[in-house]
Image (cartoon, rainbow, N blue to C red):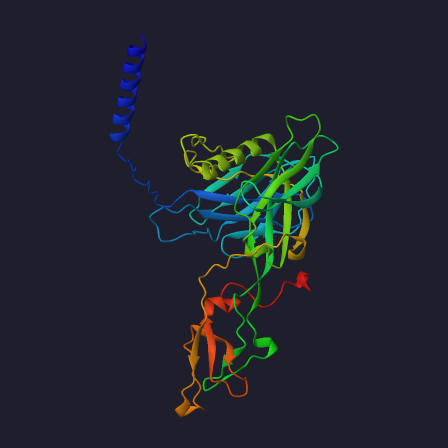
Amino acid sequence: MMEKDMKREHYLLFLLITAMGCRKPYNPPAIAIPNGYLVVEGVINSGSDSTFIKLSHTVNISSKVTTNPVLGAVLTVESDKNVIFPLTETTNGYYVSPGLNLDISGQYRLRIKTPDNKQYLSDLVPVKVTPPIDSIGYNIVSLPDTGIQIYANTHDPNNNTHYYRWDYNEDWEFRSKYISNFISTGSALVERTPDQYVSICYTNDVSSDIVLGSSAKLKQDVIHQNPIIFIASTSEKIETRYRVVVREYALTGDAYNFWVNIKKNTEQLGSIFDAQPSQLKSNIHCITNPSESVIGYLSICSVSSKTQFIYNYKLPSWVAAYPYSCNVDTAYIPFSNYRNLILFPDEYLATEPIGPIISPSGYFWTSRECADCTLRGSKIPPAFWR
């Protein structure tokens, strides 16, 4: 009996090895769409803050163009009582309206007319009231990666929300690897004045991941420490000072399911164990061509926000990883021509003199990427930074 079992195991192993050896890569051809699908991004803000809607078309994978904004469209928000609120085009496919202050007992939809005379109309959508964010905080974590995990706490005492989405804006201060203390005048190297230093800069970013939370299976409508963003201990974002503004949106159940599918299709398709791609069901439709798909889902809600600052001195002694490989080299002034100072090409910057500043015998220098932070940010701090 044991011999038969061993033979069967060997046979199965043989079949497995054979199957693995016969695998061939399959690279399906990319689907090319002449004009692309319409993409609608944004939320109708029912409160006093402005509403921003971004329109674009999808681009083919083979295209050299990465963005394809829709310009010259006409957008309006319509109520179930035939009240119309126009949106005004700004730049790069963005359309904006000042605070709408919508009646939360009504329903509203979005109408879009594109320059090619296509019309799109969303379903009528109820207004959701977003509860305030209770707090934004962070935990220091070491597994599976070392860094900080920023989280949000919120709750709805009326037990009416249950489905939440968050996004955020980030700002941070960062520094160049080396400080360039000298600048070229074209004929000499001189010490930089305070306004010529390029070692401390500021930059920002907006969220691109999809952050969701649900209390639908809980007795109380409470979200506790929902992860918002993870920042690695080696990130420049937290080497000095960091600011995050988190915005919260209340969703309907259908909107929540739409975002769950988007998240699965874009962030969780890396292995055979991940969720399989699924059809995205939008509530925005092309009424001039009902067979045409639209990417996006219209939600109408008030928006809550909260700000959190994080200071490096409150964190462990982590060391940020610089994004470039940096080295310092030396250049000496020939003794036979002492006054003819060595001037570096534009891609290099002098950091320190070799010898006395009054009569240096040369300079230390490094690449501009390692001494000029303005290549990646601005020297002017945001207004709220001061």
The x and y percentages for residue 317 are 61, 55
The x and y percentages for residue 36 are 39, 44
Residue 173 visible in the displayed image: yes
The x and y percentages for residue 167 are 59, 45
Q: Residue furthest right?
A: 157
Query: In the rendered view, would you say 94 is above or below 108?
Result: below
Query: In the rendered view, would you say 291 is above or below 181?
Result: above
Classify the position of the N terminus by image quarter: top left
Which one is nearer the viewer's eye here, 312 or 14?
14
Which one is nearer the viewer's eye here, 303 or 268?
268
Residue, x 45% and y 67% (percent of image)? 327
Residue 83 visible in the displayed image: no
Residue, x 68% and y 45% (percent of image)? 136
Q: Would you identify the image quadrant in which residue 11 lies? A: top left
Residue, x 57% and y 74% (percent of image)? 197
Residue, x 42% and y 47% (percent of image)? 116
The x and y percentages for residue 381 are 62, 65
